Amino acid sequence: MKSMFLIIGGALLRIPFAGFVFSVFRTAFMWLHYFKGESGHFGLTDIFYACAHVYGAVIFTYQLQLLTAARNATSNVQLAVSTAIWVLWGLVIFSAGALKRTIYQRLLGLTFTIVPGVRYLPAIKDGGSALALVAMIVGAAFWIVGILNAISRSPIDPDDAAQDARSAHAAI
């Protein structure tokens, strides 16, 4: 039975497009396994985790776009709402990753903050306020990510903070 599946799989991989798709998934899986780290095991649940967040953000974005369109909002307001949803969702995922100290969640959160730039900037034809709006929201998100990253690196234990202060004062 196993050899039959290997023969069928080998035949499918000889199809140019199927081989390419398999190669892309295999490479992505290997990179994600690398980002998960030695202690964590990357698996199907991690893929479902990322897909569920993407699905939730897409559905929530379209629902709020429809709500703002029904309220006769301008296209800049709809763009700002869409950008803010992706950025806030990414910041929440990044914060959870910073608290748990998992690289995978941090990278997923950063990916979510980059999504508005990838999705909306190429669609902006005039370089007016819409471009500045998306750039400002994404830039603010990266500023917050930097703050969260600095906070997660700071010592939480007051004794550690006091020891660091004493050693810094002794160095002066």
Image (tube, rainbow, N blue to C red):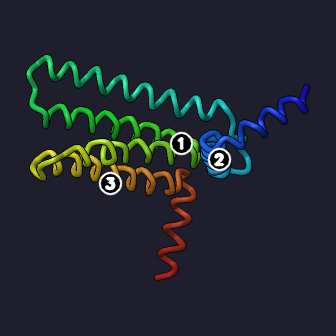
User: Which residue is labeled 3 in the image?
Assistant: 143
Q: CA distance from mark 3 to mark 1?
A: 18 Å
Judged left or right of residue 27, residue 38 is: right
Q: CA distance from mark 3 to mark 2?
A: 36 Å
Q: Secondary structure at mark 1?
A: helix
User: Which residue is labeled 2 in the image?
Assistant: 23
First along the sequence among labels 3 and 1: 1
Query: What residue lies at 61% left-to-right and 46% top-to-bottom?
Result: 20
Mark 2, Cα crowd under 10 Å, few <14 / some 14-19 / many 20+, is few
Mark 1, Cα crowd under 10 Å, few <14 / some 14-19 / many 20+, is many
Q: Secondary structure at mark 3?
A: helix
Q: Amino acid at mark 3?
A: Trp
Q: Position of residue 117 (x, y in %)?
A: 30, 48
Query: What residue lies at 49% left-to-right and 51% top-to-bottom?
Result: 152
First along the sequence among labels 3 and 2: 2
Query: What residue lies at 22% left-to-right and 46% top-to-bottom?
Result: 134
Q: Amino acid at mark 2?
A: Ser
Of badges 2 and 1, the one in the foreground is 2
Of badges 3 and 1, the one in the foreground is 1
Query: What residue lies at 77% left-to-right and 35% top-to-bottom?
Result: 9
Q: Position of residue 116 (x, y in %)?
A: 31, 43
Of badges 3 and 2, the one in the foreground is 2
User: Which residue is labeled 1 in the image?
Assistant: 105
